[in-house]
Image: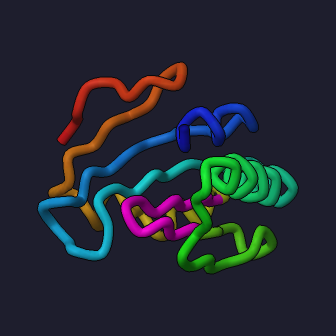
C-alpha cells in the first residue's frame, strides 16, 4: 500500500531497504524522490491520507517539503521522501549498504540487490 500510494503521485526511484537484521527501531525503509517541493508535499500528504484510511498514523514526522526531505515513521516502516539533491547527499542506500535492497518497478518490488 505504501508503494502504491507514492507511485500514484509519481514518486521517482522507489527503493525498499530491509533493515530488520540491522536495527531494532524499524523493519523497512521506503525511499523515494519527488522532483519538486510541491511534489514532495503531495507525496507526503497523499501517503498520510492513504495510511490514515487504513487506521495508521505516523508515530513521528520530520522535515518539510522546502527542506527537500520528509520522514514519516510508522514504526514497522519509515518512509523517506527526498528531493534528488537531498537523496544524493544523505545516500541512505550507501549508509545502510548491508541491507537487502528491493528496487520497485510498476508497484512491484524487483529482485533483491546488494
Residue 86: in magenta span? no
Residue 45 appears left or right of 57? right
Name the residue at 68% across, 51% down: 47
Q: Position of residue 80 (x, y in %)?
A: 54, 61
Q: Give the range drawn in magenta.
A: 72-82
Q: Quadrant of the C terminus?
A: top left
Q: Quadrant of the N terminus?
A: top right
Can you tell which quarter of the image residue 77 is in?
bottom left
Q: Is 41 or 51 nearer to us in this picture? A: 51
Q: Which residue lies furthest to the front in this view?
A: 55
Q: Is 99 or 56 nearer to us in this picture? A: 56
Name the residue at 38% across, 28% down: 109
Q: Residue furthest right?
A: 38
Residue 66 appears left or right of 2? right
Q: Position of residue 75 (x, y in %)?
A: 41, 69
Residue 75: in magenta span? yes
Amino acid at each position: 500500500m505504501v508503494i502504491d500510494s507514492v507511485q500514484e503521485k509519481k514518486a521517482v526511484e522507489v527503493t525498499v531497504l530491509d533493515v530488520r537484521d540491522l536495527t531494532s527501531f524499524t523493519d523497512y525503509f521506503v525511499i523515494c524522490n519527488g522532483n519538486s517541493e510541491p511534489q514532495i508535499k503531495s507525496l507526503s500528504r497523499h501517503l498520510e491520507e492513504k495510511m490514515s484510511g487504513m487506521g495508521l498514523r505516523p508515530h513521528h514526522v520530520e522535515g518539510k517539503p522546502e527542506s527537500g526531505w520528509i520522514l514519516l515513521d510508522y514504526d514497522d516502516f519509515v518512509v523517506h521522501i527526498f528531493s534528488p539533491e537531498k537523496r544524493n547527499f544523505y545516500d541512505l542506500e550507501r549508509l545502510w549498504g548491508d541491507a537487502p535492497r528491493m528496487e520497485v518497478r510498476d508497484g512491484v518490488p524487483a529482485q533483491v540487490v546488494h
